[in-house]
Amino acid sequence: MKKYKWEKVANEYVVSLFPLFMLPRGMYFITKKLTGVGVPIACVIRSSAVEWVARMDLWEKAHRIFIKRIKTNPETLEQFYKKIEHLGRRLIAFTKGVGKSLQKSSNQKLFSIYSTYIKLNTEYYGIGLLLPLLDYQKATFFSDEVNGILKKRDAEKHFVLLTTPGRETYNKQQELNLLRVYSEIIKIKPAYKLFQTVQAPEILKRLPGVSPKIFALLKQHTRNYTWVFYVYEGPAADMEYFVAVIRDLIKRKIDPDKELRWHRSHQKELKEEQANIIKKLKLTVAEKKMIELARGAVFFKPYRRELQSRSYFLMESVLREIATRLNLSLKQVRMMLPQEVKKALLGGRVDTGLLNKRSKAVVFWKERKEYCLSGKSAERFIKEEIKWEKINKSTKIFSGAVAYPGKATGRVKVINYPDEMKKMKGGDILVSDATNPNLMPAIFKAKAIVTNEGGLTCHAAIVSRELKIPCVVGTKFASKVLKDGDLVEVDAERGLVRKISR
């Protein structure tokens, strides 16, 4: 009997079990419920990063069953989109209230808040993970379906346009609102001069006296969007961060009013162009529905993650309170499983030695039972149970999928973690395992984006459309071969990235 190994499906830089243990739980539950095939996916935390590995034989089996269900009844997926919206809003409604009177809560009440959140977010993870189950890496349902529809009409060039959603992500809303704040700054000459001449910390010291109005606008913007780049563990964006972004916009001579006018006209033109192309191509009702579903997937995948990011930001106060009561660090609490938190809060002991082991290496997954390996057992699993793809370091040409068309030549900057963004300069080519909202300051400077992972609905694909940056995703190992300073040519018309020289 063939012994299947786990295969890598994604990389991220977050390094704690909380909230990652909820993903394998949600994935196994939803796939078992909808397809009869529970798909195990494991988080492998080591070396300040997490690698997601899965049983791809079961993933692909569940993928085929789910596709059959959708093709039989496309409205099934529309119902899932509605559920993503509903469950996401329920999650935020709950977490908005968790910070009230935490210090006065009993340990039992504190654990009740923590465990209720886990239940809500695990369910939310499950429904949201149906999107990568359909369209990610080897299993690319939406991309294949839409390309198939367009290929019959020799109209593949319309792929990006037809799959671009008209609804804005929170990240985009934040960007547009900051442009509005920037526009107001330009109208007040003393404030504008202040932003041009001094650094962010000094601006915040002087700004209340120079322009209370601008200070209030920035304060409100921070209150509304501090969580947008939080992802799993933060840090949250503060006023100094947003001031620095505005200073960068000034340095790059961005005209905020021009950008806002372009966005308004682009949104209107997008809908008109989509309608005209669909009419011209004479699509069937079923084909129109498939394109609408693909467009929905492109929106709901980042939207789901944004709502989770906001919930993680709001839950930090709960985790900090737990840490205080158990005399642990926030990092140690994030390495605990729910049953361990319960035991510790209700009178048991904390195995700090185990938590410290987990900070070095830990593997967690869910099948019929849950498994959490640390130390040597985790290292053994990583070495023996996972099929790691071999990388040819001499490769000079990488192929992937076009996320946004265009061509660009520039110097590579490999950026996977926020603290690597400082090396990014305007006009560089950003190369990453996979981008996420925490890397947006570097993405704004990029001439093109190249990622190892991703498909139609990945973060890089979505932001490249919003920013109109040439982007190639799914190259598998470009960031493992290319080095900072390499000169590359990105051909996001054909999905190719070519190394020219050092």
Image: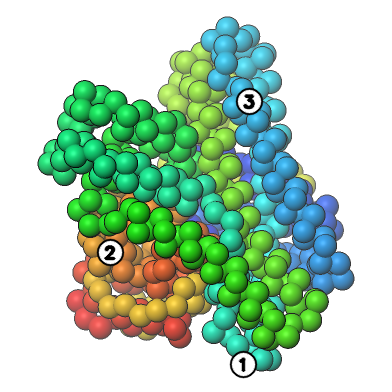
Q: Quadrant of the N terminus?
A: bottom right
| Three-letter code, disc 3 | Tyr
Query: Which residue is label 2 attached to?
Result: 413
Q: Residue at x 29, y 60 (%)?
A: 445
Of labels 1 and 2, the one closer to you: 1
Nearest to N terminus: mark 3 or mark 1: 3
Q: Identify the residue at image location x=61%, y=29%.
A: 95
Residue 322 image point, x, y percent: 53, 19
For the point 70% across and 57% down, which residue is it?
130
In the displayed structure image, the side of residue 411 where residue 476 appears, left or right: right
- Tell me the CA gap for discs 1 and 2: 36 Å
Q: Secondary structure at mark 3?
A: helix
Q: Quadrant of the C terminus?
A: bottom left
Looking at the picture, does residue 198 appear above or below residue 286?
above
Percent across and percent down for residue 388 are 50, 67
Quick one: label 3 or label 2, which is nearer the N terminus? 3
Q: Earlier in the sequence, mark 1 or mark 2?
A: 1
Query: Badge 3: how crowded within 10 Å, few (<14), some, or many (20+)?
Result: many
Q: Residue furthest left?
A: 197
The kind of residue tagged 1 is: Asp
Residue 114's disc is: 3
Amino acid tagged 2: Lys
Judging by the rendered image, the residue that carries numbered circle 1 is: 154
Q: Are marks 1 and 2 in contact (CB under 8 Å)?
A: no
Image height of 361 relative to 296, above or below:
above
Q: Give how far across and how far down residue 275 sits, in percent.
A: 65, 74
